[in-house]
Image (tube, rainbow, N blue to C red):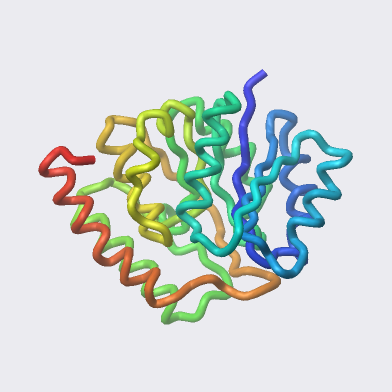
Amino acid sequence: MTKALVIVPTYNEADNVEHLIDEVLKQSPMLEMLIVDDNSPDGTAAIVRRIQETNPKVHMLQRPGKMGLGTAYVVGFKYAIEHGYDFAFEMDADFSHNPEKLPVMLEAMNHCDLVIGSRYISGVNVVNWPLKRLLLSYFANIYTRIITGMPVHDATAGFKCYRRAVLESMNLDAIISNGYAFQIETNFRAWKKGFTLKEIPITFVDRRVGVSKMSKSIVYEAVFMVWKLKFLSIFNRL
């Protein structure tokens, strides 16, 4: 049977993680979950370990401290490749990504290699964000599309599904970004290698519980990353 791994990085998500696991796994029998926890002091990992005792579809990698979103996904991608999953999802732990969209994204994978849950492919579908943050995100994606030429409306989206072949084609150790820039970089690398990218509309709802991980350094990284990718592409260094 086709297997898909939903990779969820966590840091202090004890209030969300158990409910999220329940909601994700009930969407499809082909789904399993990998929690990549960065030594959350609130006991997130202990909750996951308890669930693992009775649920073989729940997996976890624990890291010694906060090492960033991009590196969490990279170790998750390597896990997916090593364990023979057909598809690998990226998903936030805070319910900003609706688990009910997972079957829709799996269906879309019949026609492409990378599905992006897009906030901007059909208007602007973001709930509870301050106007300043919404405008920053929206225009950052226009900026990315202009500089890179990549035909993606929401290049910074973090709700995605990759075919394993896409991950295998990338030198995962060469990925150089970590925050939102990580999403731009993986999309760009997949697109430049000739894989088919497809955006499907989602509604992004700002986190229900906890604190956003957004910072100025994440924004600056994304601003400069698009130029770095453009020049790496010109010189065939991707």
Q: Is residue 4 above or below residue 50?
A: above
- Tell which of 143 and 120 is nearer to you: 143
**212 shown above or below 62:** below
Q: Position of residue 219 (x, y in %)?
A: 36, 71
Residue 107 % position (x, y): 57, 31
- State the residue in front, 122 or 202: 202
The N terminus sits in image quarter: top right
Q: Residue furthest left?
A: 235
Q: Residue 72: x, y in percent?
A: 53, 51
Examine the rendered structure and indicate whether residue 73 appears above or below residue 106.
below
Give the residue at x 75% y 69%: 42
Count of residue discs: 0
Where is residue 50 drawn, in percent x and y? 85, 49
Quarter of the image holding residue 218? bottom left
Quadrant showing the C terminus: top left
Which residue is painted at 50% across and 80% down in the image?
A: 130
Can you tell which quarter of the image residue 186 is in? top left
> Is residue 172 rendered to the left or right of residue 129?
left
> Going by the picture, which residue comes out furthest to the right?
54
Residue situated furthest top in the rendering: 1
Q: Going by the picture, which residue comes out furthest to the front?
A: 64
Name the residue: 28% across, 62% down.
Answer: 142
Is 1 drawn above or below residue 228 in the view shown?
Answer: above
